[in-house]
Amino acid sequence: MKSKLLALLLLSSCLVLPASAQVAQSIDDNNSETVAAVATPVDQPGTNEAGSDMDALVQKVKIITRTKQVTELPENEPVALDLGLVDVPGVSKNLTEGVTANAYARFVSVDDMKIGQLVLSSVEKNSRVEALNSDNFVAQFDIEQPSLDPSLPISVEGNQAELKAALERLASVQEEEEKEEKEEEIADSGVGASSGSVGSNAGSNPDASSYSTPSALDVGKEPVIVTDITTEGCQIRVDLNQLQAIQQTRVATYTDGSPEYSDCADGDVRFDIKPSYTCAYDEDLVAMKATANFIYYYADASGARQEIGECQPDEEKVFDIVEDASLCTINIDYTVPEVITRAKLVYTNHNGRLEVVRDCAPSATVPPVKMTATTEGCDIRDDFLAGYSYERSKYTYELNGVPYATACQDNGIQFKQETVYKNENGDFICTPIVSQRTGTVTMQSRIEIIANGMPQYRTACTPDTATKGIRATIEGCEDPTKWTHNLSSGQSYGSERYYYLFDDEREYVTDCQDSATIYTHQIEITGWQPHDEKLFAYQLSTVYIENTPVGRHNIILSGVIEGTVQTPYTYINTTQDRNGEVTYEECTRLDSRDEVENYERPNGTIHKVVVGEAEPLNLGNKCNVVIAWDDVVNDLFGVFLGYGNNQAFNPPNGRIGPAAKCGYSRAYQRRSYQAGSDGDVQCNSKYVEAANHCSFSTTTGTRKLIREDGVEIGVTQQGDCTLSAANPSVYTSTPDRSCDSAARYLSPGYPAYPTMTYSAKATCTGSWGW
């Protein structure tokens, strides 16, 4: 399809060439070299649809023609030839008899194929010429060899009405001429002009004696008509049924430079329309549905994104909004008491990303869970100075099949402490200590409380210090690692042992045991244990006691103490952060972003939680136009110039070719020969046509649209930029000629190759719309 389209474009350029080839100009003695830039872009929109608009205005028929002799076709440059009219539908044979169709033809090469192209420019009979609009008479056909054979017919598609009118004008002129000739013959024969006498040879017609040859008629210059296909004044039509954005074109017809335009119609340049899901979702919390929205867009010829209409819902992309409790922490209400499950409302979008509709709130699907109080696992807290002990308890509950418990704390129940020596049976609770050396007895006692109707001892057997000779000491019991540390009550018990002196030496009657000396636990915050998935942290603490025999002693070093309360993270704000993913829509760069909630941890650091997909960051057009130029190719062109007696001349350093290459100039020659320093010269007057010597400089420009990541966008375009220069082929003779100064002869050389400047290239790229 592309090859055929290119061939049609080449054919359209062929239609313009004959106009320049038919213009004859007189060469002035002081003609100077002229240079012109010619732009011939290759990739241009097709003209099929625009052509169909013009076809609707006329009736096209198949005109059958034949060449009058075997004609070699040149490549690209058209050659003039004569055709016979074999058959014109709807036209009488009387009108086509003896008529010659003047035409121009060439062949072009497209994808290793040779395609012949031909246009009719006029019809001629008896030296009478009627011009045709060559745009309306076109033939295109495949050929094996670059030549036309008279035995093979050529079908030309043409405007029947225009051709018929031209043939009728030729026939009308012929009839008028024949009528005038007949009247002149009758007048010359004297019929009806005499009274019966025989005419003499002497001129007796007074009108004839005064007759002179009339001067040539000034027919005038025929209008030059050129057609072109243009997008100027036409819009891009959006067709959502085909998902195509179609660049419209129209036909511009220039008559002597004055344009007339047809209506805009769809062209061959089209851009695919695609959906873009950059719109926000519709989130319906009543129906608990999230619907994706999209907007149509296309990338135009420059790669820029063009959006169509407004965002609209995609009914095929509807997702359920559900609760997700895994993203939230629970709430504990000790006044009820119960555990309240909190959840976020979320859905998974069409890209598989989790989107948050509502932040953490009490769940609508999971009911609150009741908590149960228990003292199991909780120790009684003692206060020996106050003389009381306190009961402690905790709450237990089950959530999603997993059991949980809160920290132990005082529940308001207290027990009075009592010092006892005997139990209810009257037996000593502790064995008295007997000192055999002194023969004294030292009594021992324990502190007791009644909890839930049952006695509990809060201290070990303690010797009565009032007994003489019995002493308590911490010596040998100074190591706090061997002491009793009660973490749930927040107390440590010192250790001591009892002794008596024998021969001034101590004799210990007990081992190290808990003493009544209590060390209250001190807590030092050393850091935090983060739980980012739950958005809370546990405080890390060092539990220690002071003023021991060895000074400070650490019981727990940087650990989480049982019952430590969860410290929630502090919500700061929600931001849109780039996630490093980059996508492109033609030339438009889109950086993917996440919807991120920022939380501050208790230690001051920031924790980021991706909660959904944010709108991509549009960084705009990231394409650059790159134009590369091939090396300049130079070319020369010579001409054929005939002298009298069928003499021919081959220009030096050139080649013989069609005279249409550079335009005509008029040369003046003589028929008789006289010797001269530059060769024989004809001296009888005669005008002949001669062309110019030409030189050409051509370079090919290649345009690419390159994205920042090196990817080429769109279609590579090429165009040939050509500069030409011309010198006349003839000029006035030098004085040493033996004929008069009006004699002409060949110019001795070619013009220099034009310089392909940056300005010339810029002129070409500007004409191509680059």
Image (spheres, rainbow, N blue to C red):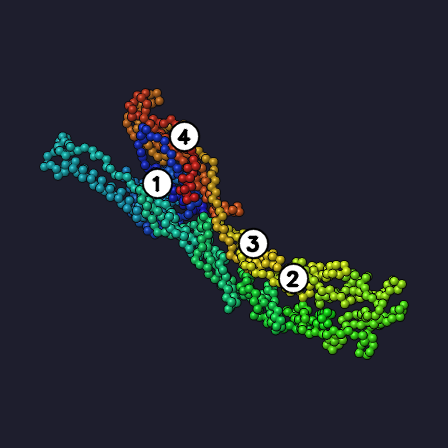
Image location of residue 665, percent across then percent down:
33, 32
Amino acid under disc 3: Asn
Which residue bears the numbered disc 4?
752
Viewer-nearest residue: 394 or 54: 394
Image location of residue 739, percent across then percent down:
29, 22
Which residue bears the numbered disc 3?
579
Which of discs 3 and 4 lies nearer the camera? The answer is: 3
- Residue under the point 39% across and 43% down: 11
Q: Give the mark nearest the N terminus, 1 or 3.
A: 1
Q: Give the mark nearest the N terminus, 2 or 3.
A: 2
Work out how far the residue at label 1 is from the one at label 3, CA to CA, in angstroms: 68 Å
Which residue bears the numbered disc 1?
103
Which of discs 1 and 3 lies nearer the camera? The answer is: 3
Q: Is residue 130 left or right of residue 464?
A: left
Q: Give the mark nearest the N terminus, 2 or 1.
A: 1
* Mark 4 residue element: loop
Q: Is residue 642 visible?
A: no
- Residue under the point 70% across and 74% down: 414
- Compared with 141, 421 (above or below) is below
Cβ atoms at labels 3 and 4 below 8 Å apart:
no
Which residue bears the numbered disc 2?
538
Which of discs 1 and 4 lies nearer the camera? The answer is: 4
